[in-house]
Image: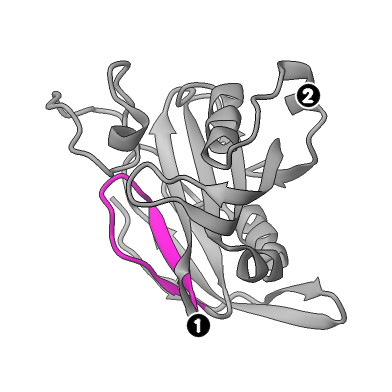
Amino acid sequence: MAGCCLVVLPVSCREGDRVVEIRETRQVDTAVKTADPGMTSAQRFGFQPAPTRAPSESAAPPLVWAVPDGWGDGLPNPMRAGSFIVAGSPETECYVAVLSGDGGGVAANVNRWRRQMGAESLSPEEIGSLPTITVLGQPCPVVELSGVFTPMSGPSRADWCLLGVVCSLPDETVFVKMTGPEDVVRGQRARFVSFCESLAPVPGE
């Protein structure tokens, strides 16, 4: 399994009239976390212990990504490939998770995030009309909601914002999700999109 490395990647994006330069990439050698059919959402994303299961023989191709300026490492979580917090706002976090298979499906995950923000579920047709960005070569819907956020554990948070992307691949599903105070998350939207678009398999893998 490949080791972790840091390299400099001259990637930038424009945020309003200001250019945001992305200076760091991260190679991740985390294997795919398999979502057993009986697992709850809290278990799938590491908030509760997962049921005991036999080790999986499959592993996801390692990913690399460009870490935006102003993002630091978040607390490690065995169900996440990466976790980040925004400088000056430790409540604002972004994480990457990789699950084998369809991870429950794009529609189910989009609507799960919507319910966390107190929004109604969308039909498949409505989900198909959401704005998309390209992640790992796939057009992926972008979930963007503001309101009262109810996490899988802990108290509800008012004036919160959620940005989320579900990327469905042939053998696994990649999730990127950012939550935090609305003003902070809105200000990080360009960095979030650039981060999602920077995800790539390790060259040569």
The answer to whether any part of residue 138 appears in the image is no
Is the C-beta separation of discs 2 and 1 under 8 Å?
no
Q: At x 70% / y 65%, what residue is drawn?
A: 186
Q: Which residue is mark 1?
A: 88
> Residue 112 or 63: which is nearer the viewer?
112
What percent of the width, then of the height, locates residue 90? 43, 73
Secondary structure at numbered mark 2: helix
Rendered image quadrant of residue 137: top right
> Residue 2 or 204: which is nearer the viewer?
2
Circle on res. 39: none
Report how far apart the C-alphas of labels 2 and 1 lie in the structure: 36 Å
What percent of the width, then of the height, locates residue 102? 49, 23
- In the figure, 131 relative to 9: above or below? above
Q: Which residue is mark 2?
A: 126
Residue 191 lies in magenta, yes or no?
Answer: no
Residue 78 lies in magenta, yes or no?
Answer: yes
Position of 91 compared to 162: left or right?
left
Q: At x 47% / y 30%, what residue is drawn?
A: 172
Position of 194 compared to 8: left or right?
right
What percent of the width, then of the height, locates residue 191? 66, 67
The answer to whether any part of residue 24 appears in the image is yes
Q: Which residues are magenta?
A: 71-87
Which residue reaches farthest right?
Answer: 17
Q: At x 60% / y 36%, what residue is drawn?
A: 114
How crowded pointer 2 is (Cα within 10 Å; few <14, some 14-19, many 20+) is rated as: few
> Residue 108 or 199: which is nearer the viewer?
108
Q: At x 37% / y 41%, what residue is drawn?
A: 152
How crowded pointer 1 is (Cα within 10 Å; few <14, some 14-19, many 20+) is rated as: few
- In the figure, 197 relative to 4: above or below? above
Q: Amino acid at mark 2?
A: Glu
